């Protein structure tokens, strides 16, 4: 069963993604920080960035 992240979490992740477009690969420390801020796991952060990079590339 899956749930979407809160609007706030999505905003935090998108903000990080778009401000690091030249290298959208957060370090382990950055992932831990984002996980804390968004109240989700580091694994979920990694998956979100993986999906986001693919979806972003498709739309270029």
Image: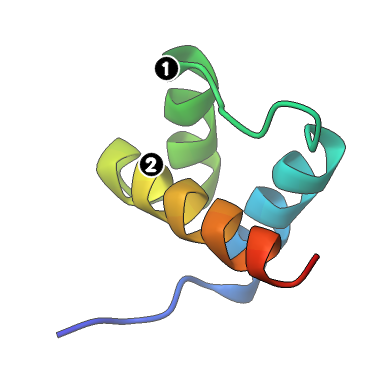
Residues under numbered marks 2 and 1 in contact, where contact means CB atoms less than 8 Å apart? no
Please tell me whether mark 1 sits on a helix, a strand or a loop. helix
Relative to 58, is 39 above or below? above
Relative to 6, is 15 above or below? above
**How far across and down, in percent of the image, does residue 38 sit?**
51, 50
Q: Along the horizontal axis of the image, is 47 left or right of 11?
A: left
Residue carrying label 2: 46
The quarter of the picture where residue 36 lies is top left
Residue carrying label 1: 28
Residue at horizontal 78 percent and vertical 32 percent from the top = 20
**How far across and down, in percent of the image, does residue 19 sit?**
85, 37
Relative to 25, is 54 above or below? below
Please tell me whether mark 2 sits on a helix, a strand or a loop. helix
Q: Which mark is residue 60?
A: none
> For this rendering, which residue is in front, 59 or 3?
59
The Cα atoms of the two marked residues, 2 and 1, are separated by: 9 Å
């Amino acid at each position: 069963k899956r749930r979407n992240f809160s609007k706030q979490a999505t905003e935090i992740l998108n903000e990080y993604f778009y401000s690091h477009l030249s290298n959208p690969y957060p370090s382990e420390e950055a992932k831990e920080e984002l996980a804390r801020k968004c109240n989700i796991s580091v694994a979920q952060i990694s998956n979100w960035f993986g999906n986001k990079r693919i979806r972003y590339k498709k739309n270029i």
